[in-house]
Amino acid sequence: MDKPVIGVRWVFKTKLNLDGTVQKHKARLVAKGYAQKPRIDYNETFAPVARLDTIQTLIALATQNGWKLFQLDVKSAFLNGVLKEEVPRAWYSEIDAYLTSSKFIKSTSEATLYIKSDEEGGILIVSIYVDDIVFTGSSKTLLSEFKIEMMQKYKMSDLGLLHHFLGMGILQTENSVFIHQSKYAKSLLVKFGLEDCKPVSIPLPTSEKLKKVDGSELADESIYRKIVGSLLYLTATRPDLMYAASLLSRFMNSPTKKHFGVARRVLRYVQGTLSYGIEYTKDRDAILVEFCDADSVGSEDDCRSTSGYAFSFGSGVFSWTFVKQNTIALSTTEAKYVSAAEATTQAIWLRFLLDDFGEMQVDATPLFCDNMSAIFMVKNPVFHQKN
């Protein structure tokens, strides 16, 4: 039996006073789950938001082209939408309809990305994340007109240059953009009582591997989950923490004191790297480049390997991940091959995205892999069953 999903609707309440005046009450949301039907509209309660990869790609592209990034904040975004049944989608439907009518072209690769061009070849790129709008482009006229029209159409705050977005600090200079989460990182250390801890040089110990059952006692599951969740959020600008956070997230259920100790060690590494972030600089070679790698039987519990990849566009990485592979690799070559395949799927999506940005990658995207056997396997057309 399908579980009901709670829908919502706005209810505005007023009360007539004895003197004839109307007393207004604050709007509120009430449950309306009965209005939704199984397999019909259960999946229509979300609002599309921009992927972090998209935002980082936009930052890298803007830096490469010498464009400035700007931000608008929508006041009471949900009140701007025409409500039907699904409140979360109301604002997105409203802004989507308006931008489409304003001759913006919506990206086929990203539902919250819109592009507009003029006759002189100028371009305007708009990315939406709920009530935050980030925009950039080469045409000062398009940028100015967009800001004026949006502020006339909706209640918005002009935040000027993009300085803070999704918890990231963004420093824009003439020739570079630096993104970081220094303030958030400091708050983590205070939250978990490690603001005065001694830093370490690397996040994970090199002499041992983690596994679910390691002989140590169980740790506080609630605190452990908070630490790992916080570290995962910090990876938005810290690819150096991605592997450690991904590894620790495998032990969310019944973590041991050993797991807990490693998690605290990662925070000690954060203590010594509070100023770390990613800098994007203007570079002549604005081409998409990808790097991939994998360990061999990295997981002690199920013998699976871990894939990792990172992409750059001129300078600074802007898309990265570490994820455990879905199958058990029978050799290091196979593990590297799977990693290369996963990186290739991301490269295809990024090429489509850059094409929407007006930066079509004419040449093939270089993929760097450190395993010659895997490279030969990819290049050899005889191995059809592996390609």
Image: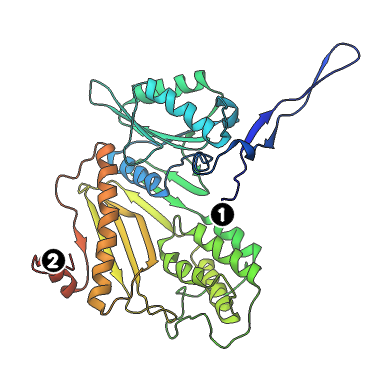
Mark 2: give few (<14), some (14-19) or many (20+) Cα within 10 Å.
Answer: few
- What's the residue type where badge 2 is placed? His
Q: Are marks 1 and 2 in contact (CB under 8 Å)?
A: no
The numbered disc on residue 160 is none
The type of colouring in the image is rainbow
Tell me the kind of residue under disc 1.
Lys
- Above or below residue 187? Residue 249 is below
Residue 15 place in picture, x, y as percent: 82, 21
Query: Label 1's element?
Result: helix
Pinpoint residue 380: horizontal percent, then vertical percent: 9, 67
Q: Nearer the viewer, residue 351 or 331?
A: 331
At 56% from the left and 34% from the top, the residue drawn is: 86
Towards the viewer: 5 or 194:
5
Judged from the image, the secondary structure of the residue bearing numbered disc 2 is: loop
Q: Is residue 217 above or below residue 362?
A: below
Give the percent coordinates (x, y) of residue 308: 34, 66
Q: Return the residue nearer the eye: 300 or 230.
A: 300
Q: Which mark is residue 183?
A: 1
Q: How many marks?
A: 2
Q: Residue furthest front?
A: 1
Residue farthest along the bottom direction in this orientation? 215
For the point 23% across and 55% down, the residue is: 289
The quadrant holding residue 79 is top right
Question: Could one spot residue 159 in this view of the protein?
Answer: no
Q: Position of residue 31 (x, y in %)?
A: 67, 38
CA gap between label 1 and label 2 equals: 51 Å
Q: What residue does disc 2 label?
A: 384
Q: Name the residue located 56 percent from the left edge and 50 percent from the top edge.
A: 2
Q: Quick one: label 1, few (<14), some, or many (20+) residues within 10 Å?
A: few
Quadrant assignment, res 327: bottom left
Sequence-first tag of 1 and 2: 1
